[in-house]
Amino acid sequence: MWNYFKVKCAWYAQHDHQISSNFKKKAADMLEDTLRTAQRKRQKPTWMLEDIWTRLNEKWDNAEFQKKSTKGEAARASKKGSLHTGGSVSIGTHRRRLEKLKGRTMNDEVFEETHVKKKKDGTRILVKPHAEGTYDGHTKVLDEWRKASPLEVAQPNHHPMMLLQDCLVLLLVLRRMRKR
């Protein structure tokens, strides 16, 4: 399809990569929409091979897939809204972008950056009241860990395992908060 598109359309060579990326993204979106419609209507697309259609139906009928699907539907229908303001971008990607932008290692600030929204007057507030509790709990546990750790590990820019340790501590904090 891409080769056919390249023959039918023209652009400057310096735009090859961007146009190729856009084409692939649009094709993936169209395929996803087609498969979603096929799943909902239980009607095989004319271009799809029968054995692939059979395997897709087996997957869609699988109990584990149904469970995940139901859970996802409930999450999307929730009125609570998301505490994460970063959209579909992962926390890791946000951290890397912030590190590149600010030119330093980012640890504590990533949570704040991805759970804060800007008001029209320019002030920044956490998206939900319990986000502040989660952030405070994470910061407290992280500070305690840093105080109890050897000096060379406790420096955020010093030890390569620091990010892994921060993630593990954050997971522990979040588990404790879920149990409350």
Image (cartoon, rainbow, N blue to C red):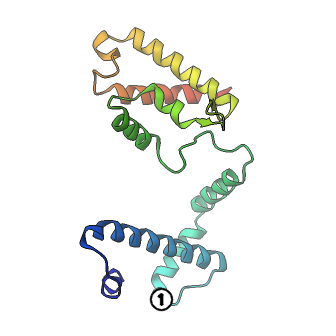
Q: Nearer the viewer, residue 90 or 72?
A: 90
In the displayed structure image, the side of residue 77 where residue 23 appears, left or right: left
Q: Nearer the viewer, residue 70 or 93?
A: 93
Quarter holding the N terminus?
bottom left
Q: Which residue is mark 1?
A: 47
Question: Helix, strand or loop at disc 1?
Answer: loop
Classify 157 as above or below 84: above
In the current view of this chain or complex, which residue is farthest to the front? 121
Q: How many marks?
A: 1
Q: List x then y, in percent, for residue 151.
A: 31, 10
- Three-letter amino acid code of the residue under disc 1: Trp
Q: List x then y, in percent, for residue 115.
A: 58, 35
Q: Nearer the viewer, residue 152 or 172?
A: 152
| Identity of the residue drawn at 63% across and 57% down | 67
In the displayed structure image, the side of residue 89 where residue 64 appears, left or right: right
Quarter of the view holding residue 49: bottom left
Quarter of the view holding residue 9: bottom left
